[in-house]
Amino acid sequence: MANTIACHPPGVTYNGLHATTTPSSPQVTDDLTFTKAHFGFLRTYYPQYNGGAVDVGQIAYGLGLKVLNSLFLFDSHPDWIENNYLQFLKPSVASGNVIGVLIGNEDPDKLATIIQYVRLVKQDFPQIPVGTAQTSGFWLADSRASQILPLVDFIGVNIYPIWNWTKPDANNQPVNGAQSVTPEQGFTSFLATYQQLVSKYPGTQVVVSETGWPTTSGWVVNTTPPKQFDIGITNARDYLTRVKNWAQSAQVNVYIHNMFDDLYGVDTSSQFNLHFGLVDYNGKTKGILF
């Protein structure tokens, strides 16, 4: 019988590279201390930073955060992946605050590595739920999903509303076709995708490993103040409030993307990706959920 992640209040994703490529332990501790003031559950992308100088799992454990911890799959560096698993992910699971493990994120090209480490986690920790975080498109339409499904305890899926990821409207907000996407339309799209997944995978737990709304698009780091449109804050608040209320009512585990606006370790092919944070680059709360 597959392990499942117990239902919990909505959590948040965390990328320690949001402001620097070399975060220190004090910086990550400050980040997660701030995070804990608003969320009790955290989804990571890396188990360590700065060449191993920062142990994310250890810091989260010390702060009492519950963690859906992730193993990042580095390109062309199987040795880095192995070291991260043995030196950081494995000890974090053993500490007791890890509620589940994700192997990889939106990387079906690394299918063999995903399968390898899913099996290893199940061997080392048979009681810990393990899965992989992939796009909704992968789970719904990629034939490779059938190779992973028998091995995982749950499906980790990143669900975003249907919109154009590279073309913002006049207010730097997402569009679908020629129309700006409203939060209501976005939530309807999100919910329809979730229901498709549940229908396709009956009996398998579906964990929303990411969903969010970008407050703006474009490179705004060097503008003073950072250029944020009020409509972006309003839209993000509306969409995420709908998602949170639904998740709590439907008893679905959801992780809001993201705690901080990401500067590094993010796909910049879409400039929206720079602005999913509840907090901006300068550590200033945007006023979305708090």
Image (tube, rainbow, N blue to C red):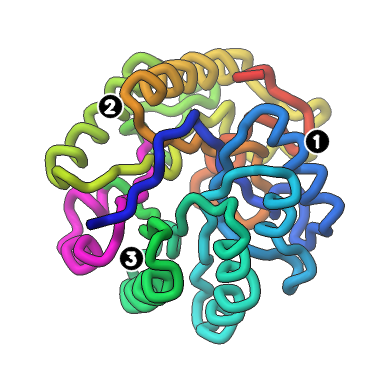
Does 139 lie within the magenta span? yes
Mark positioned earlier in the residue sequence (2 or 1): 2
Residue 70, position as x, y percentages in the image: 52, 59
The residue wearing badge 3 is: 108
Query: Could you tell me the amino acid type at mark 1?
Result: Asn
Residue 191, labelled with which disc?
2
Q: Give the Cα separation between the discs numbered 2 and 1.
A: 32 Å
- Quadrant where the N terminus lies? bottom left
Write down the quadrant of residue 180 in the picture. top left
Instruction: Tell me whether the residue at label 3 lies in contact with that at label 2, contact meaning CB atoms closer than 8 angstroms.
Output: no
Write down the quadrant of residue 227 in the picture. top right
Instruction: Tell me whether the residue at label 3 lies in contact with that at label 1, contact meaning CB atoms closer than 8 angstroms.
Output: no
Q: Tell me if residue 290 comes above or below residue 29 in the rendering.
A: above
Asked whether, in this view, residue 213 is left or right of residue 176, the answer is right
Mark 2 or 1, closer to the camera? 2
Mark positioned earlier in the residue sequence (3 or 2): 3
Q: Which residues are magenta?
A: 137-160
Q: Give the Cα separation between the discs numbered 3 and 1.
A: 33 Å
Q: Give the Cα separation between the discs numbered 3 and 2.
A: 24 Å
User: Would you say residue 2 is visible in this rendering?
Assistant: yes
Q: Residue at x 44, y 68 (%)?
A: 125
User: Local crowd at mark 3 within 10 Å, few (<14), some, or many (≥20)?
Assistant: some
